[in-house]
Image: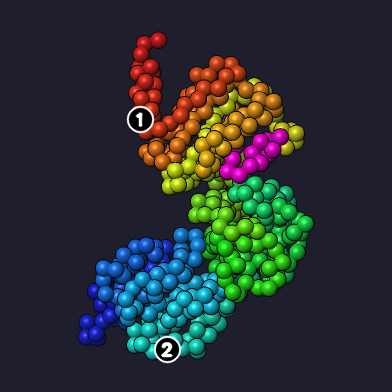
């Protein structure tokens, strides 16, 4: 809690909810300058805890938090679960599509990002005074936001124009990325979009029968231009729940939807990776985190920064990307008591021709399956909510690898997520590598890790390592 800077003025308490620390501090500072108390929360759950425990006079909340429109649910909870009078809510978002829904759920007003400190202060004072939201203020904020976003769009378009000439392999690599993304996330469609000649166009697509490269999608893919112009990610389990989805978007098989920006060093996005599917609720926060890793590494690569790329030169995941994705799958498994099967494989022969690349892509062409080069071998995992499904997926992939390359040995670690909360991805990768080195020629050594068996296995392994040879 912060002390008001103007003690002579009767102060009110305003709750600020945003998952961006910078934006929380910006809004809190604006409120302090008015002489009011500012209480902050990093997510809707903590915000609701504050509302239950303290008397709050107004709420300023972001809409897009934790990957999805969690701020809308917060407004609903506040209006339905709290006894009146409930504090007025000022909803904020860089996605104007949410304005109608936020107001329908009971928000006092809606501010389009990016907004100025003066406009925010006017909204806060109006809400605290009990005045109706001023339409003129909303229009002023929206007009300013459009101007700033237009400047960002012009910079993004100039960068992408130069990118296509300086990176001749960009389209090919982007096409591979969209195919991998669609297969891994289990969604029907993945596309990379960018601004060309003032329009949002497809730069790569996993299915050109639906969205051909070069086609305009301004009025077909809602939220994508917002992602690009605000450099913000979005996750919608059911996009059809929002009334302002453009009519032409309904011609696409679009129910679940997610998108992440590809950003320049100054934060301006030059493109966006979008995925969508005809089924609702097929994507979650872990899926968005995976998309963001892909977006961050791809953007850093084309900016020519010294970072490890997401894929290597043969379109196989780099070890670093593999470890990051595996870590996300472990967190997902622990949260939902799912299962992950990890293998490190010692291969018999090495190939790097086009047939090898195509075969490897077939091995990993499945939902939540990944493969990477590990020195002289390969790393592979399969994740699923069902134990037998994860095991079957990995066994099938190992069979394909045996036919393709030959296997001199493999170490497999089966993880039951809800039972092994303490182990990280690097530790489990090391365990799999130890197992692979111990496996006899052509055999697979497998260990199933739960809490107690893991401690027993670790103690036995340490004792064996300490014993004289």
Residue 345 in picture, x, y percent from top left? 57, 27
Is residue 117 at all visible to an observer of this figure? Answer: no
- Secondary structure at badge 2 equals loop
Question: Colour scheme of this structure image?
Answer: rainbow
Q: Residue at x 56, y 24 (%)?
A: 410
- For the C terminus, the image quarter is top left
Query: Quick check: 397 left or right of 111?
Result: right
Residue 370 sits inside the magenta stretch: yes
- For the N terminus, the image quarter is bottom left
Q: Residues within 10 Å of mark 2 (few under 14, many from 20)?
A: few
Q: Earlier in the sequence, mark 1 or mark 2?
A: 2
- Can you tell which mark lies on residue 90? none
Residue 378 sits inside the magenta stretch: no
Quadrant location of residue 155? bottom right
Quadrant location of residue 37? bottom left
Is residue 10 at all visible to an observer of this figure? Answer: yes
- The Cα–Cα distance between marks 1 and 2, rounded to whole angstroms, is 61 Å
Q: Residue at x 57, y 37 (%)?
A: 389
Residue 421 in picture, x, y percent from top left? 38, 40
Residue bounds of the magenta highlight: 359-376
Q: Which residue is mark 1?
A: 452
Vertical position of residue 196 compared to residue 190: above or below: below
Vertical position of residue 162 compared to residue 7: above or below: above
Query: Quick check: 297 left or right of 350?
Result: left
In front: label 1 or label 2: 1
Q: Which residue is mark 2?
A: 132
Residue 169 in picture, x, y percent from top left? 72, 49
Q: Residue at x 57, y 54 (%)?
A: 282
Q: Residue at x 68, y 61 (%)?
A: 253
Q: Residues within 10 Å of mark 1 (few under 14, many from 20)?
A: few
Q: Residue furthest toward the top?
A: 469
Tags 1 and 2 touching, CB below 8 Å: no
């Amino acid at each position: 809690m912060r002390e008001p800077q103007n003690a002579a003025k009767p102060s009110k308490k305003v709750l600020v909810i945003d998952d961006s620390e910078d934006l929380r501090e910006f809004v809190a500072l604006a409120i302090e300058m008015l002489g009011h108390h500012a209480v902050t929360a990093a997510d809707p759950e903590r915000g609701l805890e504050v509302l239950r425990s303290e008397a709050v006079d107004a709420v300023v909340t972001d809409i897009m938090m934790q990957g999805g429109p969690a701020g809308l649910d917060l407004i609903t909870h506040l209006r339905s679960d709290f006894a009146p009078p409930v504090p007025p809510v000022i909803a904020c978002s860089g996605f104007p599509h949410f304005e109608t829904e936020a107001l329908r759920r009971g928000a006092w007003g809606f501010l389009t990002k990016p907004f100025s400190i003066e406009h925010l202060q006017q909204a806060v004072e109006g809400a605290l005074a009990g005045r109706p939201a001023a339409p003129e203020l909303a229009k002023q904020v929206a007009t300013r936001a459009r101007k700033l976003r237009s400047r960002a769009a012009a910079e993004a378009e100039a960068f992408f124009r130069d990118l296509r000439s300086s990176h001749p392999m960009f389209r090919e690599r982007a096409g591979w990325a969209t195919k991998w993304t669609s297969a891994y996330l289990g969604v029907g469609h993945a596309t990379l979009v960018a601004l060309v000649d003032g329009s949002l166009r497809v730069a790569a697509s996993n299915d050109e029968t639906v969205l051909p490269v070069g086609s305009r999608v301004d009025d077909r893919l809602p939220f994508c231009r917002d992602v690009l112009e605000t450099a913000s990610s979005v996750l919608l389990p059911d996009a059809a729940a929002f009334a302002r989805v453009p009519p032409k978007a309904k011609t696409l098989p679009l129910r679940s939807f997610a998108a992440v920006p590809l950003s320049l060093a100054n934060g301006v996005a030059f493109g966006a990776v979008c995925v969508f599917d005809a089924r609702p609720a097929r994507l979650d926060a872990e899926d968005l985190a995976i998309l963001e890793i892909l977006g961050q590494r791809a953007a850093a690569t084309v900016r020519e920064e010294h970072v490890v790329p997401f894929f290597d030169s043969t379109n196989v995941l780099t070890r670093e990307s593999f470890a990051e994705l595996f870590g996300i799958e472990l967190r997902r498994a622990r949260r939902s008591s799912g299962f992950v099967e990890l293998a490190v494989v010692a291969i018999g022969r090495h190939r790097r021709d086009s047939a090898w690349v195509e075969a490897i892509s077939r091995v990993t062409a499945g939902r939540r399956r990944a493969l990477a080069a590990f020195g002289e071998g390969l790393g592979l995992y399969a994740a699923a909510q069902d134990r037998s499904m994860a095991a079957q997926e990995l066994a099938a992939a190992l069979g394909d690898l045996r036919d393709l390359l030959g296997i001199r040995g493999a170490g497999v670690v089966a993880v039951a997520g809800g039972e092994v909360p303490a182990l990280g991805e690097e530790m489990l990768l090391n365990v799999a590598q130890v197992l692979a080195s111990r496996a006899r020629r052509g055999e697979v050594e497998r260990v199933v890790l739960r809490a107690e068996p893991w401690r027993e296995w670790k103690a036995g392994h340490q004792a064996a390592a300490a014993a004289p040879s």
